[in-house]
Amino acid sequence: GTLVVFKYTGFLLENINQLFHCNLPIPNLPLPLGISFFTFRLVSYLIDCAWGKVHAEKNFFTFLLYVSFFPITVSGPIARYASMQKDLHSRSISAYDISEGFGRIAIGLGKKVILADNLAPIVEQFLGNSLIDQTTFGLWYGIIVYSMQMYFDFSGYSDMAVGLGRMFGFHFPENFRYPYTSKSITEFWNRWHISLGTWFKEYVYIPLGGSRKGNVYFHLFVVFFATGIWHGAHWNMVAWGILNGLAVIVERKWKKQREKLPRFFAWLMTMIFVYFSWMLFMAPSFGNAMEYFRLLFHSPYSAENINFQWSFFLTGRTMFFLIIAMIGSFMPMQWREQICRRWKRADGSA
């Protein structure tokens, strides 16, 4: 109820006014910091207590610490009480924890400041200005760069949150696991914002019946509809959630045919769909998103009508950050660690 009042009141009243031709006043309510995240933590706590999965916390200040632990309040990951209960009551902090925490913070800060913040001006250049002045290639280029920017921005914050938690003796679950290496939309959602997907699975999908009772396709649709509206009170967010839900439903229905696809072709189809869906996520409104889609395939300006030069798109600075972003997105950490170890051995032998 609190989340609906603060986050969705304006959205609901706007649609009521349009649907019934009313003129209800729309209050400009301030959105409390991190309300979506600490609301979900509170809801999971209440449900787990009701189901007997955890015992109610007796110490009110310990409970407040769980709800408002600052590293995960703004952007997650969404940590449930069951995963934090042990650390809340008895935790020890070692030099190894401090070292690992600092290292994780450094990785997250690098993702955010070095990559995401330097990719943002490129996105603004190709997607933030008047779309009528862009080419079809420029729009495609912009959405690919936007996908990279958003991933490094979000996963970078999650890395910093996990690192900060580790330095205080808390062990938070991973929130991203190389989602852009996925070969299906289902796999993508198992790798992207993992804590949110786990939350909806535990408290929406399974209680509805999961894959054992009722209509599994309806259950998946409800989960992704809720996922979309959770991300923002806009129709394009609802459409984004429904689109991903329909994709997961189609994959589940034709799972055997999907598994026969060549791995590269399956990955390519997944990435094209993901890039398309980010258009809905990025657009300020549903109408803007439809305009993006139209111009992706039919821009009023083409490469032949303007002074098209590759150097405009691929400057040295842009290429540097894009190459680093591609390596960070598609090369798992263990591969990079193995390469570093080989270089060290080669240097030592030399």
Image: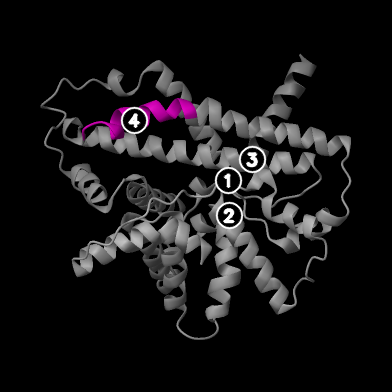
Q: Is residue 261 visible?
A: no
Is the residue marked by circle 4 packed among few (<14), some (14-19), or many (20+) residues within 10 Å? few
Relative image position of residue 7 (x, y in whole percent) = 45, 56
The kind of residue tagged 2 is: Phe
**Res 87 quadrant in image:** bottom right
Segment colored magenta: 117-130
Residue that badge 3 annotates: 159
Report helix, strand or loop for mark 4. helix
Residue that badge 4 annotates: 124
Residue that badge 2 annotates: 37
The kind of residue tagged 4 is: Glu
Q: Is residue 115 above or below residue 46?
A: above
Q: Do the residues labelled 3 and 4 touch (CB within 8 Å)?
A: no
Out of 67 and 102, give the one closest to the viewer. 67
Could you tell which of marks 1 and 2 lies nearer the N-terminus?
Answer: 2
Report helix, strand or loop for mark 2. helix
Q: Residue 74 carries which label?
A: 1
* In this rendering, the label closer to the viewer, 1 or 4: 1
